[in-house]
Image (spheres, helix red, strand yellow):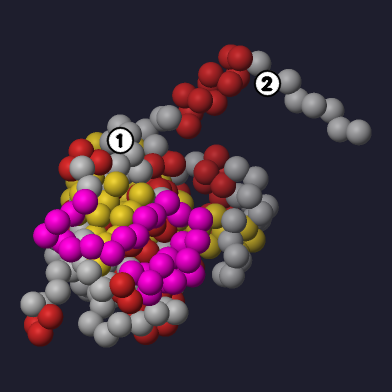
C-alpha cells in the first residue's frame, strides 16, 4: 500500500503560481507566407484571453512571453506553426564557429536543471531559408549533444525516436534561438483531412490548413458561436470544431448540409456544432450569439 503525499495549501498556492508564471517562448513558423503565420499566432493569443506579451518578431519566428500552457495551446491550434520552444538562450550567429556557439550555450544554461532527471534527449537544428548556412545542421547537432552529455556526466542518453527532451536551435537572419521543444506539429495531420479523403467530397473545397487559418484569424473563442453561412461539405466547420469552438453551419443545398454532417461526425464527433438548411440572405440567428462569420462564398457558375 502506497503512502499518500500530503499537499498543503501553501504548496498548492506555490504550484498554482508556477503554472501561471510567464516564460519566453519562440514559435517556429511556416515560411510559405511573410506575414500570415505570425498574425495567426497573435490572433490565437488574443482569443485565449490570457496574459501575454509579444517580445519580438523575426522572419518566420515570433517570441512571446506567456505561460507554457498557453504556448502549447496556441501551437496546437495554429495552422502555420511548426513547433514552439521554451526559450533558454538567444545570440548572434554571424561569423560564429561551431565551438563558439556550443561554448555560449554550455556556459549560459544549467542543463542539469533543464533536463531534471529525464532519461533521454535529442538536439535538432533548423533554419529559416538559408540563415547561417555556413553552420551545417548535423555537425552542430552532434557538438551540442556531446556538450550536454558531458555536462550531465553521461547520466542521459540520446534517443532519436522518442526523446524525453528535445532541444531546438533555430537560425533566423543572423540570430539563433535555443530552447526546449514543448510542442511540434505532427507531419501529415492536415493532409489526412484533405477534401478528397473525407466521407463526403465536393470539388473546389478549401484545404484544411487554410480553413483553420481563416477560423483562427477571427480571434474566436469557445465563449461565442462561429457561423459559416455557405458551409458546403463543412471544411471550415471541421477545423473550428476540432479546436473546441462552437460552430454553426448553413447551406441552401440540403445535400451539402447532409454531407457536412457526415464529415463532422467523422472528424469531430463529440464537438459542439449545429447545422441547418437556409438562405444566407436571411440568416435565422441573433447577431449577439455570433462571435464571427468565416466562409468561402460560392463563386463561378453558382453565383
- What residue is rendered at 44% in x and 79% in y? 199
Membership of 143 in magenta stretch: no
| Label 1: few (<14), some (14–19) or many (≥20) C-alpha neighbours in 10 Å | few
Q: Of the residues under marks 1 and 2, which one precedes in the sequence?
A: 2
Q: Which residue is the extreme one toward the right?
A: 1
CA–CA distance in space, label 1 to label 2: 30 Å
Query: Can you give x and y, in whole percent of width and height, for residue 186 in the image?
Result: 45, 68
- What residue is rendered at 62% in x and 58% in y? 120
Horizontal placement of 55 versus 84: left or right? Answer: left
- Pick the front one: 62 or 47: 47
- Pick the front one: 192 or 285: 285
Query: Can you give x and y, in whole percent of width and height, for residue 297 in the image?
Result: 14, 69
- What residue is rendered at 20% in x and 42% in y? 286
Q: Secondary structure at mark 1?
A: loop
Can you say whether 61 is above or below 193 in the image? above
Q: Is residue 30 visible?
A: no
Residue named by callout 2:
7
Can you say whether 299 is above or below 284 in the image? below
Which corner quadrant holds the C terminus? bottom left
- What residue is rendered at 35% in x and 43% in y? 222
Query: Can you give x and y, in whole percent of width and height, for residue 68 in the image?
Result: 43, 41
The range drawn in magenta is 257-284
Query: Can you give x and y, in whole percent of width and height, for residue 224 in the image?
Result: 29, 42
Q: Is residue 298 visible?
A: yes
Q: Quadrant for residue 160, please give it.
A: bottom right
Which corner quadrant holds the N terminus? top right
Q: Residue 49: which numbered mark, if any?
A: 1
In this view, the mark in front (1 or 2):
1
Amino acid at each position: 500500500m502506497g503512502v499518500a503525499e500530503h499537499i498543503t495549501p501553501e504548496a498548492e498556492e506555490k504550484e498554482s503560481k508556477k503554472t501561471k508564471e510567464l516564460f519566453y517562448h519562440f514559435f517556429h513558423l511556416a515560411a510559405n507566407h511573410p506575414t500570415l503565420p505570425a498574425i495567426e499566432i497573435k490572433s490565437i493569443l488574443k482569443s485565449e484571453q490570457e496574459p501575454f506579451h509579444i517580445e519580438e518578431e523575426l522572419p518566420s519566428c515570433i517570441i512571446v512571453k506567456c505561460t507554457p500552457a498557453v504556448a502549447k495551446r496556441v501551437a496546437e491550434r495554429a495552422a502555420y506553426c511548426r513547433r514552439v520552444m521554451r526559450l533558454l538562450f538567444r545570440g548572434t550567429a554571424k561569423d560564429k564557429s561551431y565551438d563558439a556557439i556550443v561554448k555560449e550555450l554550455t556556459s549560459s544554461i544549467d542543463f542539469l536543471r533543464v533536463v531534471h532527471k529525464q532519461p533521454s534527449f535529442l538536439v535538432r537544428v533548423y533554419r529559416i531559408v538559408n540563415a547561417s548556412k555556413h553552420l551545417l545542421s548535423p555537425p552542430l547537432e552532434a557538438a551540442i549533444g556531446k556538450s550536454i552529455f558531458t555536462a550531465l556526466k553521461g547520466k542521459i542518453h540520446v534517443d532519436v525516436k522518442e526523446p524525453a527532451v528535445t532541444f531546438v536551435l533555430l537560425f533566423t537572419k543572423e540570430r539563433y534561438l535555443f530552447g526546449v521543444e514543448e510542442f511540434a506539429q505532427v507531419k501529415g495531420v492536415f493532409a489526412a483531412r484533405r477534401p478528397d479523403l473525407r466521407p463526403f467530397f465536393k470539388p473546389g473545397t478549401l484545404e484544411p490548413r487554410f480553413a483553420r487559418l481563416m477560423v483562427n484569424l477571427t480571434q474566436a473563442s469557445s465563449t461565442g458561436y462561429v457561423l459559416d453561412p455557405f458551409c458546403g461539405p463543412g471544411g471550415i466547420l471541421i477545423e473550428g470544431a476540432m479546436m473546441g469552438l462552437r460552430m454553426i453551419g448553413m447551406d441552401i443545398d440540403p445535400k451539402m448540409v447532409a454531407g457536412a454532417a457526415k464529415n463532422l461526425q467523422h472528424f469531430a464527433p463529440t464537438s459542439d456544432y449545429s447545422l441547418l438548411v437556409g438562405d444566407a440572405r436571411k440568416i435565422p440567428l441573433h447577431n449577439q450569439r455570433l462571435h464571427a462569420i468565416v466562409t468561402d462564398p460560392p463563386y463561378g457558375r453558382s453565383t
